Amino acid sequence: MKATYQAVLLSGIFVVITFCSYAQAVDTSTFYPKNPIATSSASIMLQGKDSMHKHLYRMNYAVSIPFCIVATAADIYAIPYVIKAKKTITDQELAGLNPNIMTGLDHYALTLDPSQRQTFMKASDYTLPLLIITPGILAFDKRINRDWFRLLIMYYEMHCLTFSIYNYSWFGPAFQNKYRPVTYYTQLPVSERNPGNNRNSMYSGHEATAIASTFFLVKLYSDYHPEIGNKKYLLYVLATIPPLVEGYMRVRALEHFPSDVLVGLAIGGACGVLVPEVHRFKNHKVQFNISSNPFNGGGAGLGMTWHIDQKQL
């Protein structure tokens, strides 16, 4: 991803802070009624004075904040020294490219109009920041806005993880050197086809960031509103549409093949859902014990049990 997107992400976070700070000033007395009998089950869970407020998500700031700092530093380091440190594509490499090895799905990216490349590039660059700040609308939800600080840290943590998987995992450009579609377009000047950054087609970081943001939004909303039931799956479907549009524009910009977008979709979507879900675990108790082992003639055996309590704090 471009270096500017670290700054874009931080800007998006500060926009969310602004929204949440505003929402904190909203009178919540109508949401926390004095008569618990008149409330729904979801309201009962969240009602009461500040001292009685129960959080849906467990936050260990002593772990989360250092992780965010280290991950941010590592991701910033990766931009010049991992992502953009690849060697220029040689003329021999360009001449040896074989579009016929592409699958039918990916071959679509080699049949586009290269004259539209810059238009779709700019469109995707403008769309991504808008998707990053979409969780800010949760600040106007009275069930959610009082937890804004912990949710903000969790949101930043989620993006740190998404960036780190992109920058350092086997799936991303640190280990993959897949040529971008633009390298195959001989009608474009060599100066557009041979930069080292064009070895970073696998996978789409834009797509991963986009869907991580929208899925995070739906995950939080559905957790705070259990009364919506299975309708949350419809929300996830709707939350997939804007990232798919982003991915389409990245393909039209000749930056990625459709398979790159699908990988980014899977990884980013998983981060957007799993990070909040992990924070819902109240206790992670690991117990070791020595006991009789019936499969070893009654001899001693070592056992481990992991207990997870998913009750709200």
Image (cartoon, helix red, strand yellow):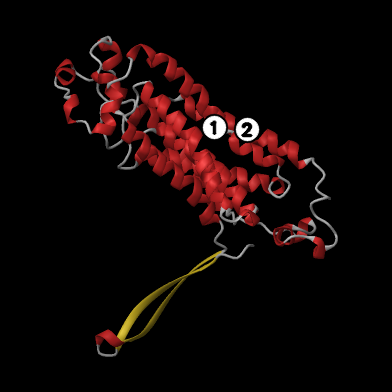
Left or right: residue 185 versus residue 210 is left
The kind of residue on which mark 2 rests is Phe
Task: Locate residue 188, reporting x and y percent.
Answer: 28, 11
Picture layout, residue 308 above or below residue 273: below
Give me the residue at 40% from left, 26% from top. 250
Mark positioned earlier in the residue sequence (1 or 2): 2
**Pointer 1: residues within 10 angstroms few (<14), some, or many (20+)?**
some
Task: Locate residue 291, reporting x and y percent.
Answer: 37, 85
Does residue 203 appear anywhere in the picture?
A: no
Q: Quadrant of residue 137?
A: top right
Identify residue for label 1: 131
Picture layout, residue 223 above or below residue 152: below
Does residue 160 appear anywhere in the picture?
A: yes
Left or right: residue 21 versus residue 38 is left
Task: Locate residue 96, reporting x and y percent.
Answer: 14, 21
Q: How far, Cα to Cα, is label 1 from label 2?
A: 14 Å
Label 2: which secondary element: helix
**Pointer 2: residues within 10 angstroms few (<14), some, or many (20+)?**
some
Asked if labels 2 and 1 touch by Cβ distance under 8 angstroms, the answer is: no
Number of the label disc, if any, that sits on residue 14:
2
Say which of 146 and 112 sits in front: 112
The kind of residue on which mark 1 rests is Leu
Quarter that holds the N terminus = top left
- Farthest residue, direction right: 34
Say which of 43 and 111 sits in front: 111
